[in-house]
Image: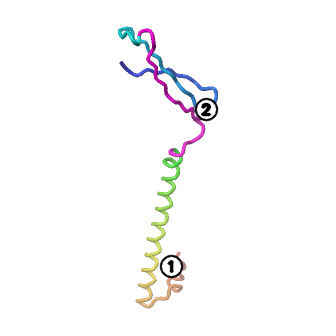
Amino acid sequence: MGDITYPYTFKISTDYEAILQAKISSDPKYKDTPLTASFDITEVNPNIASLEEIVIYYAIPMGALIGTGFFVLSIRKKKEQKVKVILYIIGIDKSWLIHLLTSTQ
């Protein structure tokens, strides 16, 4: 026995109940009285994103992008502080160095 698929398009977005009935011809009890099983079905509008989709496709990448941006900015700030310390140690004024670098271009 395999999977059974019955495609159906719901007309109204609401909750449904599917009832499966099966008669078993070799069983005297279920030959006349069908064996029944019911399943709750919730119809979902495919045009509305679920919370899981929003988190997976938007929130996680956005968080990673923001985190990467902060990481890059912190590295740049540390490099800038190192340059200031080196310039201070060797006695070069930062404004003089900026003027020197911009005037050669």
Residue found 45% across the figure and 14% down from its top: 34
Which residue type does callout 2 highlight?
Answer: Thr
Give me the disc on residue 14.
2
Most extreme residue toward the front is 29
Q: Is residue 81 left or right of residue 13?
A: left
Foreground mark, 1 or 2, reads: 2
Say which of 67 and 91 sits in front.
67
| The magenta stretch spans residue 47 | yes
Q: Give x and y (percent) for residue 66.
A: 51, 61
Query: Is residue 62 placed above or below 71 in the rendered structure?
Result: above
x, y percent for residue 54 = 53, 47
Q: Report the residue at 40% width, 22% height from top.
A: 3
Residue where numbered disc 1 is placed: 101
Examine the rendered structure and indicate whether residue 71 appears above or below residue 7: below
What residue lies at 49% left-to-right and 88% top-to-bottom?
A: 93
Label disc, if present, on residue 56 of the rendered structure? none
In the drawing, does residue 29 fall left or right of residue 46?
left
Estimate how packed mark 2 is, as few (under 14), some (14 to 19) or many (20 or more) residues with alpha carbons within 10 Å: few
* Residue 7 image offset from top left, x and y in percent: 52, 22
Judge left or right: residue 46 versus residue 75: right
Which kind of residue does numbered mark 1 sit on?
A: Leu
Look at the image and give the residue range highlighted in magenta: 31-52
Instruction: Please report whichever mark, 1 or 2, sits nearer to the chain's N-terminal start.
Output: 2
87 falls in the magenta region: no
